[in-house]
């Protein structure tokens, strides 16, 4: 069964992530869909709870700041289980927030799930677009937890940069 965004020119599906975030306490994978052009480029990320009869209406929505071109949802990612609680965690890139410095929301899987980010990671370079890309890279530092990489595609005026966040339990440093 298909789903689509709620308005024209949203770029619904520009980024996709699948995993057992499980705010609805089942055994089905859930779907996170980015729509960075939604709401006049504020952007949105839609979370759909998985089920045997998945519907087309999102269960949770994260949205960029109205009136700004934040482009929330430009990147979304299943970032494994950062805090080892048995639920997948997700990240949402908002690369054009705050003069293009960008942000990345880290959302830990929990029951009940809500739209409050558990961590907000922030870029430090104007128009660096931190949060353009998000990925997990396994356990880089040997602490038995997945580690997180976030790209800033225009950092230092187009040179670009990748940031590594090593994690331990629920602390990102």
Image (cartoon, helix red, strand yellow):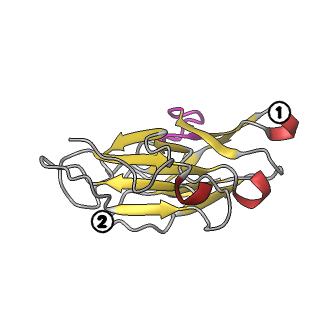
Q: Give the structural element (helix, strand or loop) at label 1.
A: helix
Circle on res. 158: 1
User: At x 26% / y 44%, what residue is drawn?
Assistant: 29
Give the Cα separation between the discs numbered 1 and 2.
40 Å
Percent position of residue 128, x then y = 78, 44
Residue 35 left/right relative to 52: right
Residue range highlighted in magenta:
137-148
User: At x 30% / y 46%, what residue is drawn?
Assistant: 3
Residue sitting nearer the eye, 102 or 27: 102
Residues at marks 1 and 2 touching, judged by CB atoms closer than 8 Å: no
**Is residue 53 depicted above or below 23 in this figure?**
above
Residue sitting nearer the eye, 167 or 8: 8
Mark in the foreground, 1 or 2: 1
In the displayed orientation, state which residue is furthest to the front: 8
Q: Is residue 82 visible?
A: no
Q: Give the structural element (helix, strand or loop) at label 2.
A: loop
Q: Residues within 10 Å of mark 2 (few under 14, many from 20)?
A: few
Residue 63 left/right relative to 65: left
Q: Residues within 10 Å of mark 1 (few under 14, many from 20)?
A: few
User: At x 83% / y 49%, what residue is drawn?
Assistant: 125
Provide the major secondary structure of the magenta segment: loop
Q: Earlier in the sequence, mark 1 or mark 2?
A: 2
User: At x 70% / y 46%, what residue is drawn?
Assistant: 130
Instruction: For the N terminus, give its image quadrant.
Output: top left
Percent position of residue 19, x then y = 33, 43
Whether the magenta-drawn stretch holds residue 111 is answered as no
Percent position of residue 98, x then y = 75, 60
Circle on res. 3: none
Q: Is residue 132 visible?
A: yes
Which residue is under mark 2? Answer: 111
Residue 149 left/right relative to 4: right
**Is residue 28 depicted above or below 46 in this figure?**
above
């Amino acid at each position: 069964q298909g789903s689509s965004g709620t308005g024209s020119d949203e770029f619904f599906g520009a980024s996709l992530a699948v995993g057992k975030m499980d705010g609805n306490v089942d055994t089905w994978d859930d779907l996170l869909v980015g729509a960075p052009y939604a709401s006049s480029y504020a952007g949105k990320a839609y979370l759909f709870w998985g089920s045997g009869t998945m519907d087309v209406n999102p269960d949770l929505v994260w949205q960029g700041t109205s009136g700004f071109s934040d482009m929330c949802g430009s990147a979304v990612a299943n970032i494994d289980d950062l805090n080892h609680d048995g639920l997948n965690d997700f990240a949402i890139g908002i690369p054009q927030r705050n003069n293009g410095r960008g942000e990345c929301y880290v959302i830990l899987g929990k029951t009940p799930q809500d739209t409050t980010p558990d961590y907000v990671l922030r870029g430090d370079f104007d128009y660096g677009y931190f949060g353009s890309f998000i990925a997990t890279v396994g356990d880089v530092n040997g602490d038995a937890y997945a580690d997180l990489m976030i790209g800033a595609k225009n950092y230092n005026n187009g040179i670009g940069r990748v940031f590594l966040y090593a994690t331990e339990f629920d602390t990102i440093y």
